[in-house]
Amino acid sequence: MAGDNAAYTIVVGVSATSKSPTALRWAADLAQLRHGRVVAVRAWRPTPPQTASRVSPSPVHEDVDAARDQALADLQADVEAALGRDHGIEVELVSGGRRKALLAASKGADLLVVDAPRRLDLGSAPGFAQRLVYAATCPVVVMPPSVSGAPQTPLERAATAVGRSVTEAAGRAGRPGFSHPNPDTA
C-alpha cells in the first residue's frame, strides 16, 4: 500500500476489447475525491513470429518497438475516449499475460479496478476476476458487466434468443393460438 507521503494510487486494467470506460471513469472520480492518481494499464506481448515449421526461421519479423508504440497509442486513445483529452491519467503497457501484468502493476497500489469478463466470453478464462482478487496485494474492485455496460457477446445474444424461443414453445405446447406476452413490450 502507498505510504502517507505517496499519492493514493488506483491501477485500472484497461481491456483491449471493451476499453473499460466505466472502470476508468469510476477510478478517475475516486482518485479526484482522494486527491490521488490513476494508472491505466494494459497487458502486452509481442506477436509471436509466423513460421511454417518449428525449425525454419520466420519469413515475417515484427518490429517489436513499432508494435509496442502502437499498443501504447491504442491504450492512450482508449483512455482519451473514456475521459476526454485532458484526463491526467498515466498510461502503461506491462509485458506479459493479463493476470500477471495486472498483479505486477498493482503491487504497491492502493486499489485495482477491472471489468469482469462477460460470463460467456470464450476468450476469457472462467474465474479470471476471482483469481485476480485472491492473488492481488491490494483491494480489487470488479465492475460487473451490468454496471460496466459491456455489450452482450454474440454467444449471449444467441443464448437469450434460444431461451426465449424455448420458453415460448413450452408455454404454447398443447394450446393452439396461445402465446405469452412479450416481456419487451409489457
Image: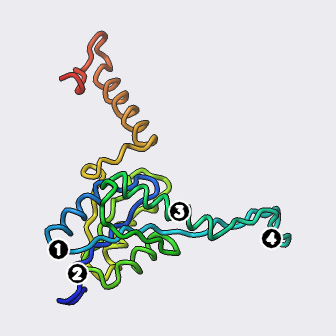
119 and 108: which is toward the camera? 108
Q: Position of residue 162 (x, y in %)?
A: 40, 33
Kindly state the secondary structure of the residue where label 3 is placed.
helix
Q: CA distance from mark 2 to mark 1?
A: 7 Å
Kindly state the secondary structure of the residue where label 4 is placed.
loop
Quadrant where the N terminus is found in the figure: bottom left
| Residue at 31%, 24% in the rendered image | 168
Q: Are marks 3 and 2 in contact (CB under 8 Å)?
A: no
Which numbered disc covers residue 71? 3
Q: Position of residue 48 (x, y in %)?
A: 67, 67
Going from the N terminus, do you reach mark 3 or mark 2 first? Answer: 2
Q: CA distance from mark 1 to mark 3?
A: 29 Å
Question: Would residue 158 be found to the left or right of residue 35 on screen?
Answer: right
Q: Which residue is mark 4?
A: 54
Circle 3: residue type: Ala
- Mark 4: give few (<14), some (14-19) or many (20+) Cα within 10 Å: few
**Direction left: furthest residue:** 33
Going from the N terminus, do you reach mark 1 or mark 3 first? Answer: 1
